[in-house]
Image: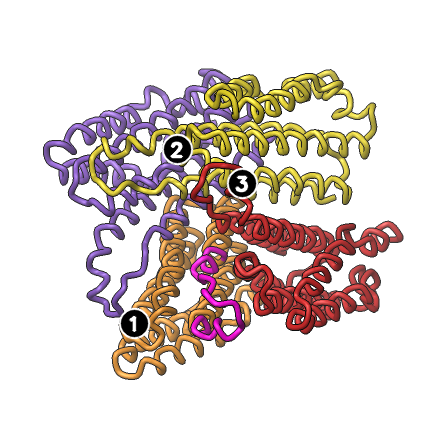
Chain colours: A yellow, B red, C orange, D purple
Amino acid sequence: MGKVRLEAFSDAVLAIIITIMVLELRVPHGDSIADLAPLLPKFLNYVLSFIYLGIYWNNHHHLLHTLHRVSGGILWANLHLLFWLSLLPFVTDWMGENHFAAGPTALYGGVLFMAALAYSILVWTMIASEGRASLVGRAVGRDLKGNLSLAAYALGVGLSYWQTWLAQGLYIAVALTWLIPDRRIERAISEE
Amino acid sequence: MGKVRLEAFSDAVLAIIITIMVLELRVPHGDSIADLAPLLPKFLNYVLSFIYLGIYWNNHHHLLHTLHRVSGGILWANLHLLFWLSLLPFVTDWMGENHFAAGPTALYGGVLFMAALAYSILVWTMIASEGRASLVGRAVGRDLKGNLSLAAYALGVGLSYWQTWLAQGLYIAVALTWLIPDRRIERAISEE
Amino acid sequence: MGKVRLEAFSDAVLAIIITIMVLELRVPHGDSIADLAPLLPKFLNYVLSFIYLGIYWNNHHHLLHTLHRVSGGILWANLHLLFWLSLLPFVTDWMGENHFAAGPTALYGGVLFMAALAYSILVWTMIASEGRASLVGRAVGRDLKGNLSLAAYALGVGLSYWQTWLAQGLYIAVALTWLIPDRRIERAISEE
Amino acid sequence: MGKVRLEAFSDAVLAIIITIMVLELRVPHGDSIADLAPLLPKFLNYVLSFIYLGIYWNNHHHLLHTLHRVSGGILWANLHLLFWLSLLPFVTDWMGENHFAAGPTALYGGVLFMAALAYSILVWTMIASEGRASLVGRAVGRDLKGNLSLAAYALGVGLSYWQTWLAQGLYIAVALTWLIPDRRIERAISEE
C-alpha cells in the first residue's frame, strides 16, 4: 500500500531540491566569460551537492525497491531524510558564497551528517518493520560504509575549523566512494 | 478513473510547497555559525510547517486510498485544500520574520484553520460521492479529532493577540497529536 | 505508448506553475494584519489564476483520458499549451502589482486567449490523430463553449483600455462557467 | 527494475527546469504594454530554451522507451544529462540580459554542446548495457544528426566572438531540425 506514492513524493522532492539549487547561481553583472570567475567556487559547490543528491536518489531508489509495506514510521523516517536534504541548497549557497570560511564548511558537513543519519534511521525503521531476515535486513548488514561516512562527516565538521580545504576534500572523497550504487541490495535480490 | 493523476498532482504540489519554503531561508551575510542565530526562529517555523505538510501528505495519502471514483466535486475540493496549503510558505515566512508578533501568528493559525476545514470538506465531498456506508464514511465517523483541531486553530488565532507564545505552543501541540497517521482508515480497511 | 509520461510531465509542470505563483506574494514589512491590505488585489489575482490553472488541469485530465496514441504532434501541441500556461505567474504578478492598469489587464487576457487557443489546437491535433469518429472527436463537437471563451478573452483585451474592471469581471465570469469539468467527455465515455 | 522511477525523476527535473525559467522574467516597473519592450529579447530566449527542453524531453521519452534494465552507469549518465540541462535557466537568463554580447552567447552554446554530449553518453551507456543488436543500438546507428548538432554548437561558440547573431541563428536552426521527434526509434520499434 502506498509505496508508489512514497516513491513519487520522494522523487518530486529530490527533483525540486536538485533543481532549485541552480536558482542560487545569480548571473554576473558583466557580459564576458571572465565575469564568471567569481562564480566558480559556487559552481563547484553546486556540482558537489548535485552529486550528493544524485547519490541519495540512487540509493533511495534501491532501498525502497526492497520495501513491502509502508508503515507510519517509514513515512516519517522518509520525511525526516527529505527534511535534511532540503537544507542542502541553503548550506550549498552559504558555503559557495564563503568558500574558504570555516563556519559554512562545518555546517555543510553537519547537514551531510544529519542526512546520512536520517538515511540510517530509515534503514533501521525498514528493518524493524520488515524483519532482520528480510531483503533489506540481509542486504545492509552491519553497514560499515554508512558508519564510516558518518564518521567522515563528523571529522569534516571538526577539520573545518583547522584546515577548511581538508574538510571540503573529505566531503568530496566520501562522495566519490558512493558514486557506485549500493551493490549489496542488487546482490541480495539476485541471490533470492 | 483519474485517481492516479489526482494523487500524482497532489504529491507534486505538496512536494513543491514543502521544498520552496527553504528558499525563504536566506543565507546570512557573515560566515560564522553565530551569524545563523537570527535565523533560528525562522528555521523552527520551517520545521513546524514541514511537519504540518508531512501530516497532510500522510493523511491525504490514506484518505485517497479509500477513493473509488473521482468526481468533479472531489477534484475541486482537493484543489481547494492545496490552495490553502500553498499559502503556508507565505505565512511561515511572515511569522518567521516577526516571530513574536501577534498578526503573523494569528494569520498562521488562520491558514491552518482553513486548510483543516478544506480537508474536512474534501472528506465530506468524498462521503457524499461514495456513500455513508463506504470505507471513508465508516472510517471517519464523527471526526472528533478533526473538529477539535479546528477549534484549537480558532483558539490560536484569538490567543495570538493575548499571549502569542501560547498560540504558537498550541499549533505545535496539535501537530504532535497528528504525527501518527490516521489509524481509523487502516482499521476500516483491515476490518473489510 | 508514453501517455503516462505525457500526463506525468504535464501534471508536474502544472503543479509547479500553480505553486510558484505564491512565491510572488512577498511578505509585508509590518507585522499587523492591516499591513496585508496592499497585498489584497495581488492575492485575489492569485486566487483567479489558481482557479484557471485548476480548470486547465481538470479539463486536460479529462481530455488525455480519451487519448490512445501519443504522436509527435500531440507532444508539441501539449508543450505549446504548457508554454502559455507557464506565463500565467508572470502576468498574474504584473496585474497584481498594477491592479487597475489597462496594460497588465490586457496582457492577462492575451495570455488566457493564447492558452485557450493552445488548448483548442491540442484538441484538433488529437482529433486529427484519433479520427473524427473517435471519443474526443464525438465529445468535443463544434466546441461552442471553447469558442465563446476565446471571444470573451479577446473582448477582455479590448475592454481593458476602456473599463479595466469590466475586463477583469469578464475573466472571472468565464472562469465560473468552466468550474464544472467538461461533461461532454464523460457523457461520450458512458455512451460507449 | 526502476525504469518507472528513472522516468518519473527525469520528468520532474525537466518540468521544474522548464518552469523555473519563467521566474527569471521579472515584471517591468511601468504598467503599459510598451514597458514590456526591454523584456522581448529575454522572452525570445525563454522561448528558445523552452523548445530545447521540449526537444530533450521528447527524445528522452523515446530513448528510455527502449530501455530494459537500469544499471548504475545509466543512472549516472542520466543525472549527468540532467545536470547540464539544469544550467539552461542560468545561461538563458544571462544571454537574455546581454542579448548581443559574445560571452553569454558562447556560454549558451557551450551548455548546449555539453547537454548534447551528455545525451550521446547516455545513448552509448545504454548501448553498452543493452548490446549493439538491441533496439537502441539498431535505432541510433552512426547518429549523424547528433554529431552534426554537436559540431554546430561548437561552431556557435566560436562564431559568438565574431558575429554573435550568427551563433544565435545557428542555435535556432539546430533546434528546428529536432522539432520532429526522433523517428529512428519509432521505426525500429515497428520493424520489430
Q: Which residue is mark 1?
A: C106
Q: Is residue D38 magenta?
A: no
Classify residue D135 as left or right of residue C154. right
Decide: is C162 above or below C186.
below
The residues tagged by marks 1 and 3 sit, at their Cα atoms, a distance apart of 50 Å
Label 3, secondary structure: give it: helix
B165 vs B21, left or right, is: right
**Left or right of A91 on screen, residue A25:** left
> Disc 2: which chain?
A
Considering the numbered disc 2 on the image, is that residue within a helix, a strand or a loop? helix
Type of the residue with mark 2: Lys
- What residue lies at 55% left-to-right and 59% top-to-bottom? B86
Magenta residue check for C34 = yes
| Alpha carbons under labels 3 and 2: distance apart | 22 Å
Query: Please, which chain is the residue tagged with disc 3 on?
Result: B
What segment carries the magenta color? C19-40
Residue at the extreme left:
D162
Image x and y of residue D187, in percent: 40, 31
**What residue type is disc 3 on?**
Ala
Q: Amino acid at mark 1?
A: Ala
Alpha-carbon neighbours of circle 1 within 10 Å: few (<14), some, or many (≥20)? many
Give the Cα distance between marks 1 and 2.
41 Å
Q: Which mark is residue B34?
A: 3
Question: What is the chain identity of the residue bearing mark 1?
Answer: C
Residue that label 2 marks: A42
Q: Secondary structure at mark 1?
A: helix
Pointer 1 and pointer 3 on the same chain: no
Q: Position of residue B31 (x, y in %)?
A: 46, 37
